[in-house]
């Protein structure tokens, strides 16, 4: 855990082609010429029972939040979303929830791919011309945690 | 005539008392003089016992000449006696025993002779004063000194207003909304009126403009006016402006700029530079110099001779306007009564008609226009600001009136090319509906648009604009997010003076609009044929959010809305009805604090405006400090705080320069070592200060990046280290070469506290000793070390001075403050000071105390060299009113 790679929360201006997970054809660039600036991932409207997991908040706090929603909040199901590095944590949270409910909860996981946008700003903008924008993909997980219907 | 009568009565003889009543009280000496035995004639001037001058007594006195010689004195005396106290009530001329209750209300209680005057002075009834014409006159009078924005009255009802920079601005709302405003910024939308920002327009050939402007900027400090994307007009740029050719040493301040997109086959370009009003007075002469524009273009309406040197600053506060004399209002209103009082459209009335707003160069054809107050600028901050805009504004509906009419829109409608462009712009504007957060767009995007009068679609109740992610064309949305607005769509007719004037002049008044609404068949329905006047060209400019640092990226992004003047309120109310919060000046400070961006002019101590601000702030804080009774004041001397109200940056930079020179590579962070240097520095400071130059703030991007890596950046509270690129590690040689390149400089740092504590402004940033860091590692002293209380040597001096009130030699001694030649600021306390905080507060986004400030580069590098890698960049922070040091992590953010 040397770097907060959760894209929903952080953007790291750094030099060089640090991220090789770019899906777009590799852009030829000089490591000094460009500054990478990550844009926030596209957000979607959020219901009350959606939980977006990040790497900044304490794990226990996020777990407690989910438990509150299920027990006190009166939701029959919640949806735990995790992106990139936070996938691991989202899975952990879901499993912890299930374990602590003594089998009353069930999980249904879905994965997806999220398109992220990076801005490449030239260091010397007068000559380099256009700043570039590139897209790359990152994995995401959406875990539905729910009480199964009685029948 | 009164005067001469009185002066004659002086002559009538000794036994007649010439000065009745109040006069005798004022000049008791005259009475005493009379009683002296030598008093046999009237003698002018000073004399002892009256003896010296009595020898040559005049045989006769010519009454006229005698009276004339004394007329001035007597009239001055009478004036002094007659002068009433501050307010101008008539009855204040009466002695106390003749005053009666409710005299100002019922003039019949006054003596007969004063009644007439009092009747004239009586204020008109409230109804009369509230009559429209009178009210406007009163408003015009009140905004003569400080300009009102168009939303002034709206703000004045709800905000604490301050008079700043020649404007009346809302500082903070009268209701409690600090947290609500923060929430609005981070989750919905906060609205601010930024119309006080000054716009300067430059017109000319592109290469000539660029050549002129390149003298003001430097590529080392980031993109300049010539940045390719900004030059095309698709993005707004921001740049730091320096005096011509004085790159590192003489900065002026930050500006944002906007190029008008190119028209086909033309090299003629138009550029708007937006600057803070305190910056404008420095910037405008500088622009005139680099563009060689000195010929003031006199406005055609005013044939008055103008002096170009005087016009260099058309800053409204500098306009040579007569101070309003109390009592002149009546005269003016009577004079104006001949014509109906004209409503001032702001911008026109605020500067003298003879003041030129335009300068032309004869050599290169560049024209500079001062568009201050010509364009209204609103700023919407927050992720939902685009939904507010989409809700409020509607792209202008076309019209098929083929008649020749003076309005601009029908003329444009007949042009096919313009209509296709308008259609494209409207399409892009509609794509905004499909976007969830403002931060998804490329920063600085510009979108030109023509919209309908938003008053027509005003909701009946205040609603909260919420995003409804409609199913817009996914492909188009993606294109907009990746590439921004295509170049032709950035064009707007707001760039054209004639269209702006046309729109401003033909605005439908509120009254007329209401009349038209009342004639609609179904009450509350929309006016079916939109009135032709209701088309406004606007410009939407995306504002980037937080761009530096590793957390809360693009927090506080938003849109700026540029409107032609006169339309301010017509857009303000509809925006307010969409559930936005309104912020004042203090919210813009909080906004920049959360963005970790320096706030102009507060955080630009090397700029003229920043220096000015610092002096004002010091005077204000000192004044506030002195208002407390001495026993209730903080004794800053005892707290070891040398300069609680002002940061002596120059002295700090100089001292660190000396410390580094002396110490060389030797570690010099311990207090004992510095106690030794303290004496030496104080001696050497006198000899060495001369060759040292002024301090500068480090803005070189490369140097900042290097410094940032050396600080070992972490997330806030220092939890996780962040990755940096491959840069040379910190070493003695690297530091020496760095310091030789950037001597006497300060660097902008972001400080977050590791434990509790709320930093305040002017808190000290100090270097921890190795023992402190060891304690921090052991988790024993996480609270941080304490500063031993200092002794106040000046207290006894002040006490002594009190006993002998005659000798007011050291009058600048204030209890609890250091007198002026400050001692060594760096090594005054047990921990060495490297800098100060300029903004600090509990940060609601990070959940801990966070501060922004400057540290001396020399001091910082010296500290970093001596710190182990696990404690790199850890400093101590101490508030001026506290003895407790707190650990903090500093980050240099690029």
Image: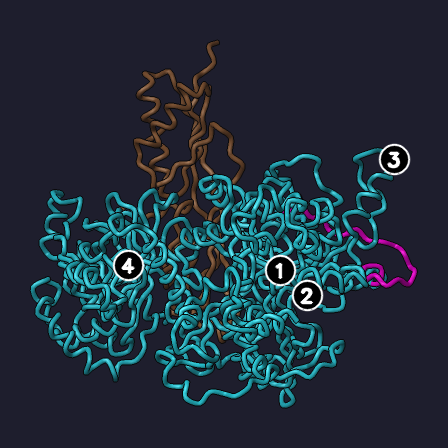
- Observer-side mark, 2 or 1, equals 1
Question: In the drawing, what numbered circle is on residue B349?
Answer: 2
Label 3, label 2: how many angstroms apart (C-alpha)?
Answer: 40 Å
From the rendered image, report the letter of the chain displayed in cyan.
Answer: B
- Observer-side mark, 3 or 2, equals 2
From the rendered image, report the letter of the chain displayed in brown.
Answer: A
> Mark 4 vs mark 3: same chain?
yes
| Of callouts 2 and 4, the N-terminal one | 2
Residue at x 19% of width, y 54% of height: B639
Q: Are marks 2 and 1 in contact (CB under 8 Å)?
A: yes
Question: In the drawing, what numbered circle is on residue B143?
Answer: 1
Label 4, label 3: how many angstroms apart (C-alpha)?
Answer: 67 Å
Badge 3 local density, few (<14 within 10 Å), some, or many (20+)? Answer: few
The residue that label 3 is drawn on is B521
Foreground residue among B660 and B735: B660
Queried whether the magenta region covers residue B408, the answer comes back as yes
The residue that label 4 is drawn on is B644
């Amino acid at each position: 855990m040397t770097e907060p790679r959760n894209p929903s929360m952080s953007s790291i201006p750094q030099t060089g082609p640090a991220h090789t997970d770019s899906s777009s054809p590799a852009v030829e660039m000089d490591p000094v010429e460009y500054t990478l600036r990550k844009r926030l991932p596209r957000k979607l409207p959020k219901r009350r029972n959606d939980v977006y997991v990040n790497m900044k908040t304490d794990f226990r706090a996020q777990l407690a939040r989910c438990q509150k929603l299920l027990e006190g909040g009166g939701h029959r199901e919640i949806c735990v979303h995790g992106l990139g590095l936070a996938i691991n944590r989202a899975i952990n949270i879901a499993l912890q929830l299930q374990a602590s409910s003594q089998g009353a909860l069930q999980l249904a996981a879905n994965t997806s791919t999220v398109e992220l946008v990076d801005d490449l700003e030239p260091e010397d903008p007068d000559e380099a011309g256009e700043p570039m924008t590139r897209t790359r993909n990152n994995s995401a997980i959406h875990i539905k945690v729910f009480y199964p219907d009685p029948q | 005539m009164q005067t001469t009568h009185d002066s004659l009565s002086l002559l009538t003889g000794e036994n007649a008392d010439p000065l009745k009543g109040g006069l005798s009280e004022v000049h008791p000496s005259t009475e005493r003089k009379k009683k002296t035995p030598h008093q046999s004639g009237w003698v002018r001037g000073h004399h002892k016992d009256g003896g010296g001058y009595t020898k040559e007594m005049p045989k006769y006195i010519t009454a006229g000449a005698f009276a004339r010689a004394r007329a001035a004195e007597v009239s001055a005396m009478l004036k002094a006696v007659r002068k009433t106290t501050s307010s101008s009530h008539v009855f204040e001329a009466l002695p106390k025993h003749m005053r009666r209750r409710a005299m100002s209300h019922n003039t019949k209680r006054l003596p007969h002779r004063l009644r007439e005057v009092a009747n004239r002075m009586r204020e008109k009834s409230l109804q009369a004063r509230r009559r429209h014409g009178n009210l406007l006159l009163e408003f015009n009078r009140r905004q003569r000194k400080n300009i009102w924005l168009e939303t002034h009255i709206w703000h004045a009802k709800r905000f604490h207003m301050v008079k700043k920079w020649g404007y009346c601005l809302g500082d903070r709302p009268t209701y409690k909304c600090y947290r609500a405003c923060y929430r609005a910024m981070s989750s919905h939308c906060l609205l601010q009126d930024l119309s006080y920002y000054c716009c300067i327009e430059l017109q000319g050939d592109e290469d000539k403009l660029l050549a002129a402007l390149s003298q003001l900027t430097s590529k080392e400090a980031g993109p300049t006016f010539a940045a390719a994307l900004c030059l095309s007009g698709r993005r707004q740029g921001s740049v730091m402006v320096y005096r011509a050719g004085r790159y590192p040493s003489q900065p002026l301040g930050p500006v944002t700029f906007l190029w008008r997109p190119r028209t086909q086959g033309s090299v003629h370009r138009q550029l708007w530079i937006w600057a803070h009003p305190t910056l404008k007075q420095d910037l405008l002469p500088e622009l005139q110099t680099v563009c060689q524009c000195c010929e003031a273009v006199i406005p055609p309406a005013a044939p008055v001779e103008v002096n170009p040197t005087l016009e260099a600053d058309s800053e409204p506060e500098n306009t040579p306007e007569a101070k309003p004399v109390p009592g002149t209002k009546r005269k003016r209103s009577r004079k104006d009564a001949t014509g109906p009082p004209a409503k001032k459209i702001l911008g026109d009335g605020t500067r003298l008609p003879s003041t030129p707003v335009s300068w032309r160069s004869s050599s290169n054809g560049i024209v500079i226009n001062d568009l201050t107050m010509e364009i209204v600028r609103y700023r919407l901050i927050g992720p939902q600001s685009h939904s507010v805009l989409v809700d409020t504004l509607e792209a202008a509906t076309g019209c098929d009136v083929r008649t020749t009419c003076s309005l601009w829109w029908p003329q444009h409608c007949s042009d096919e090319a313009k209509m296709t462009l308008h259609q494209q712009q409207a399409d892009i504007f509609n794509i905004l509906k499909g976007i969830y957060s403002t931060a998804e767009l490329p920063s600085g995007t510009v979108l030109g648009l023509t919209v309908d009068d938003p008053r027509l679609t005003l909701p009946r109740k205040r609603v909260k604009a919420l995003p409804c992610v409609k199913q817009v064309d996914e492909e188009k949305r993606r294109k907009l997010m990746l590439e921004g607005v295509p170049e032709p769509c950035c064009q707007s007719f707001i760039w054209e003076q004639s269209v702006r004037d046309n729109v401003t002049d033909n605005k439908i008044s509120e009254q007329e609009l209401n009349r038209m609404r009342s004639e609609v068949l179904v009450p509350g329905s929309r006016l079916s044929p939109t009135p032709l006047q209701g088309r406004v060209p606007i410009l939407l400019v995306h504002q980037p959010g937080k761009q530096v640092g590793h957390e809360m990226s693009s927090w506080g992004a938003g849109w700026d809305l540029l409107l032609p003047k006169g339309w301010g309120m017509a857009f303000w109310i509809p925006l307010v009805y969409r559930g936005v919060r309104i912020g004042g000046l203090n919210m813009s400070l909080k906004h920049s604090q959360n963005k970790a961006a320096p706030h102009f002019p507060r955080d630009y101590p090397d700029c003229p405006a920043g220096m000015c601000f610092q002096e004002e702030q010091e005077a204000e804080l000192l004044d506030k400090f002195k208002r407390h009774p001495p026993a209730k004041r903080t004794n800053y001397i005892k707290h070891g705080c040398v300069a609680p109200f002002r940061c002596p940056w120059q002295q700090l930079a100089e001292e660190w320069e000396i410390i580094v020179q002396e110490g060389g590579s030797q570690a010099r962070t311990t207090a004992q070592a510095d106690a030794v240097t303290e004496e030496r520095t104080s001696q050497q400071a006198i000899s060495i200060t001369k060759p040292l130059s002024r301090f500068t703030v480090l803005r070189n991007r490369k140097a900042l990046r290097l410094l940032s890596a050396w600080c070992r950046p972490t997330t806030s509270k220092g939890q996780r280290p962040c990755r940096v690129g491959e840069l040379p590690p910190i070493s003695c040689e690297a530091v020496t070469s760095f310091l030789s390149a950037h001597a006497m400089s300060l660097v902008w740092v972001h400080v977050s506290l590791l434990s509790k504590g709320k930093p305040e402004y002017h808190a000290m940033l100090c270097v921890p000793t190795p023992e402190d860091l060891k304690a921090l590692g052991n988790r024993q002293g996480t609270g941080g070390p304490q500063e031993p209380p200092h002794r106040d040597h000046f207290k006894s001096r002040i006490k002594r001075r009190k006993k002998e009130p005659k000798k007011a030699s050291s009058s600048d001694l204030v209890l609890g403050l250091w007198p002026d030649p400050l001692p060594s600021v760096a090594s005054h306390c047990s921990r060495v000071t490297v800098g100060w905080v300029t903004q600090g507060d509990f940060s609601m986004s990070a959940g801990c105390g966070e501060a922004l400030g400057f540290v001396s580069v020399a001091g910082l590098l010296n500290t970093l060299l001596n710190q182990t890698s696990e404690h790199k960049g850890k400093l101590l922070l101490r508030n001026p009113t506290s003895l407790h040091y707190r650990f903090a992590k500093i980050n240099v953010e690029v």
